[in-house]
Amino acid sequence: MDPRITKLADLMVNYSNKVSRGDIVQIGGPVVTMPLMQAVYEKCIEAGAHPFCEFEAS
C-alpha cells in the first residue's frame, strides 16, 4: 500500500478523530476511495475500535 495513504489513515484515526478502544466507526465513500477506506479500517482495528464500511455507487 502507498505509504502516503497509510500516513493519512493514521492521521485521520489517531489525530483528527482520536479513535479509541470500543468506538464504533462508520467509514463511507465511493468505491474509488477503497484503498484509503481499507487503511482507515486497519488503523481503527489497531486502535481497538469496531469499524464498518459503506460503499457508495459511483
Image (spheres, grey):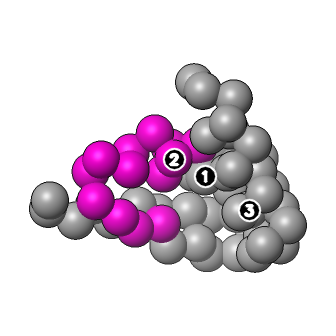
- Label the magenta part by its dominant secondary structure: helix
In the image, what residue occupies the spot 51% across and 47% down? Answer: 36
The answer to whether one can see residue 41 in this image is: yes
The three-letter code of the residue at mark 1 reads Val
User: Which disc is residue 6 wearing?
Assistant: none
Q: Earlier in the sequence, mark 3 or mark 1?
A: 3
Q: Amino acid at mark 2?
A: Leu
Q: Nearer the viewer, residue 25 or 4?
A: 4
Return the x and y of residue 9 as percentages of the image width and height. Answer: 67, 51
Residue designated by label 3 = 13
Spatial CA span between label 2 and label 3: 12 Å
Q: Residue at x 40, y 61 (%)?
A: 53
Residue 45 visible to an observer of this rendering: no
Q: Is residue 57 left or right of residue 26?
A: left
Q: Which element carries disc 3, helix, strand or loop?
A: helix
The image quarter containing residue 15 is bottom right
- Write down the quadrant of residue 13 in the picture: bottom right
CB under 8 Å between callouts 3 and 1? yes
Instruction: Give the labeled residue for mark 2.
Output: 36
Residue placed farthest to the front in the image? Answer: 4
Image position of 13 (left or right of 31): right
**Are the residues at dot 1 and dot 2 in contact (C-beta closer than 8 Å)?**
yes
Residue at the image point whose x is 46% and y is 39% from the top? 35
Give left or right: position of 56 versus 5.
left
**Residue found at the very far top of the displayed protein:** 1
Residue 14's image quarter?
bottom right
Neighbour tally class for label 3: few under 14, some 14-19, many 20 plus, Cα within 10 Å: many
- Which residue occupies the foreground of this view, 51 or 4? 4
Q: Nearer the viewer, mark 1 or mark 2?
A: 2
Q: Which residue is mark 1?
A: 40
In magenta, the rendered stretch is 27-39
Judge whether 37 appears above or below 50 on screen.
above
